[in-house]
Amino acid sequence: MTHFYSKILLFGEYAIIKGSRGIAIPFQNYSGRFEFANSKDSVPANLALDQFSAYLQNSGILSHVLDIDQFQEDINKGLYFRSNIPCGHGLGSSGALCAAIFCRYAYNFELKNDYSSKELKYIQDHLALLESFYHGTSSGLDCLISLINKPILISGRNELKIIDRPNFEHFGFFYLLDSNISRKTAPLVHYFLDQLDRNDDFKNSVSKFIIDTNSIIDTVNTSNRSEFSRLFEEISQMQLKTFSHMVPDELKQLWRAGLESKEYFFKLCGAGGGGFFLIYSNQDITNRFDNLININ
């Protein structure tokens, strides 16, 4: 059966909530796919497919988009989602499952090499409803990246465009660092929105962050390495100061040391709080930290 890969939000964390652009890419180190167990007793229960099926049955929209009867029949036969995508780490574990469900059970859907913006929006909206089962609310972006397995430029809620994978090697070295801390996205987003409403300094800093996020995406397109490095450093400084609530205490010293030495720079990879963090450097730092994954 088809594999559905994890995703990395390279740029746009939190900023896209307020209208900035963003870039998300599929990450093929982790993936999941549907399989059938030999017996229902051996089916993993962590993804609660029976409850998911009931949720879909009660959805006035999704019950007309998906073949839920077939989904439930397959669950009864031992269907489960075999995945090595770590949960609560910002790589889209539930998004991959929702992508798999949509791909297998959506009426009149087939994977193809290209999609119009209108098609992407339609798919994203329905994937958002699917993933709401796990998160309460969802943008559907994680699911969409996993489903189509292509990088996407986000230019607004209704503006999505498939792009080529950025040429990481032109800019330097990029890594994921596993904090080995699981987290939930919703409380962090709620904190972000609350601070925007109540804290003027936070709001002003986020406004500058949005400008820097849009600018660094421009440098990806123009291949301006020196400007890219400068902006990444600015984003790293801003996040350590303004988004300190989203940076685990265990990482703050390492984060600060990178800024002081200018040897490497941390940034959030999604909501933060735990899970994976993105590191950029002009040099190979593979042996500097444990739990590093090279994504070049």
Image (tube, rainbow, N blue to C red):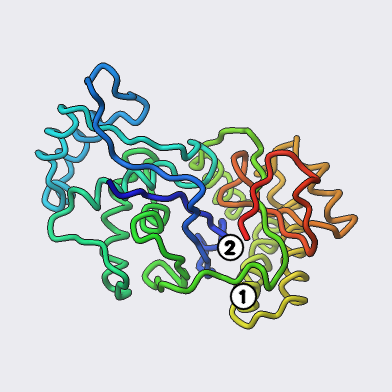
Q: Which residue is depicted at the point 37% across and 49% down? A: 4
Question: Can you tell which quarter of the image residue 89 is in?
Answer: top right
Q: Which residue is depicted at the point 50% across and 37% down? A: 86
Up-down: is 181 above or below 96? above
Which amino acid type is marked by label 2? Phe
Where is residue 187? Give x, y as percent.
Answer: 52, 39
Up-down: is 114 above or below 269? below
Where is residue 262? Give x, y as percent.
Answer: 86, 60
User: Residue 284 or 184: which is nearer the viewer?
Assistant: 284
Q: Which mark is residue 11?
A: 2
| Farthest residue, direction right | 261
In the displayed structure, does residue 109 sit left or right of residue 196?
left
Q: Earlier in the sequence, mark 2 or mark 1?
A: 2
Which amino acid type is marked by label 1? Val
In the displayed structure, does residue 198 sit left or right of residue 231?
left
Assess whether mark 1 and mark 2 are in contact (beta carbons under 8 angstroms). yes
User: Residue 70 or 9: which is nearer the viewer?
Assistant: 70
| Marks 2 and 1, how far apart at CA | 11 Å
User: Residue 205 or 107: which is nearer the viewer?
Assistant: 107
Where is residue 242? Give x, y as percent.
Answer: 72, 53
Can you identify the residue that label 1 sits on?
220
Q: Callout 2 environment at 10 Å: few (<14), some (14 to 19), or many (20+)?
A: many
